[in-house]
């Protein structure tokens, strides 16, 4: 692993090479992510399906309560809530677990010559596997209430952009978490606030005035471009534009920080 100081554009070139080499080891990242899931639930009777059960309990408990509080038909609210919760769970894990992307892999980083991007893939895929286990509950809810995805370009485009954003978030917070050890509690506090500000447990149409200001919350368009098409709802062009803009800013910030700090990561962890 080359830890010499880099000058000029060398840091960007080496960061691109690191990312390319990391994706060539995609299967290794996936295997490490799956191994993390297995070790987390080692000795458990249900194993990873505890995530499915906990999601079902949360959706059932919150669905009936908040549908009554917001005076929304359960047929409309329960699919919305179930899908929103698992999307938020993946986003929250990308931030919280992203902070320990490199600090949690200190043994591998110090022992093996491996692209740093492999560790980012590991955390991203681990979050995706958790998401897929929880998605079983959403699939059942969709079948019960007859929800079918929109069969156009929006659904696959939203999913691909979402996955790319989860990788960028993991990379960004991985570097920040390696440098600043206060990042996990700080990010947890911010995400807790965003959970209530973002339309996750409440629907956007509950706001009658100032709805346009929802786009100032970067989490809303990123969630909506996945949630809307897969719930057979039209997504406004302004939401797509905001999602692409936030994604671009996210990737620029993540890659710029990774490029500048890549050679120092091994020292920080």
Image (cartoon, grey):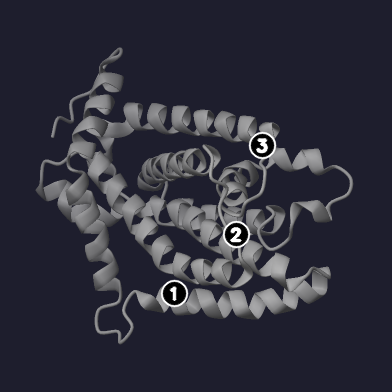
Q: Position of residue 192 (x, y in %)?
A: 61, 59
| Residue 109 in the figure: left or right of residue 36 | left
Q: Which residue is label 1 attached to?
A: 52
Residue 244 is drawn in which quadrant?
top right
Count all numbered tags in the image, as a single digit.
3
Label 2: element kind: helix
| Residue 253 in the figure: left or right of residue 230 | left
Are the residues tagged 2 and 1 within 8 Å (C-beta)? no
Q: Please determine whether, in this image, residue 82 is positioned above or below residue 158.
A: below
x 80%, y 76%: residue = 68
Q: Which residue is label 2 attached to?
A: 84
Q: Position of residue 52 (x, y in %)?
A: 44, 74
Q: Nearer the viewer, residue 166 or 2?
A: 166
Q: Position of residue 135 (x, y in %)?
A: 46, 65
Q: Residue furthest top?
A: 8
Return the disc, 1 or 3, that comes first in the chain's sequence.
Answer: 1
Q: Which residue is label 3 attached to?
A: 239
x 59%, y 66%: residue = 82
Q: Position of residue 139 (x, y in %)?
A: 50, 66
x 37%, y 76%: residue = 49
Q: Nearer the viewer, residue 256 or 225?
A: 225
Q: Please determine whether, in this image, residue 67 is positioned above or below residue 218.
A: below
The answer, for residue 124, to whether it is visible in the render is yes
């Amino acid at each position: 692993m080359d830890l010499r100081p880099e000058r000029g554009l060398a840091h960007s070139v080496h960061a691109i090479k690191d990312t390319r080499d990391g994706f060539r080891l995609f299967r290794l990242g996936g295997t490490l992510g799956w191994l993390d899931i297995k070790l987390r639930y080692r000795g458990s009777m249900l194993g990873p399906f505890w995530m499915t059960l906990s999601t079902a309990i949360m959706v059932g408990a919150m669905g009936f309560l908040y549908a009554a509080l917001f005076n929304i038909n359960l047929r409309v609210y329960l699919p919305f809530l179930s899908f929103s919760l698992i999307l938020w769970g993946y986003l929250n894990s990308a931030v919280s677990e992203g902070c320990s992307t490199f600090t949690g892999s200190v043994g591998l980083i110090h022992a093996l010559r491996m692209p740093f991007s492999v560790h980012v893939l590991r955390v991203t895929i681990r979050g995706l596997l958790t998401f897929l286990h929880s998605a079983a509950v959403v699939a059942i809810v969709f079948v019960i209430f007859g929800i079918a995805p929109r069969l156009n370009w929006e659904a696959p485009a939203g999913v691909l952009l979402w996955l790319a954003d989860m990788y960028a978030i993991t990379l960004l917070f991985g570097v920040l978490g390696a440098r600043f050890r206060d990042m996990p509690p700080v990010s947890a506090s911010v995400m807790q606030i965003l959970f209530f500000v973002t339309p996750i447990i409440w629907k956007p149409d509950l706001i009658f005035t100032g709805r346009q200001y929802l786009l100032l919350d970067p989490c809303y368009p990123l969630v909506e471009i996945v949630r809307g098409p897969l719930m057979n709802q039209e997504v406004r062009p302004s939401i797509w534009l905001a999602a692409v803009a936030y994604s671009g800013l996210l990737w620029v910030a993540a890659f710029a920080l990774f490029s500048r700090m890549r050679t120092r990561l091994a020292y920080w962890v």
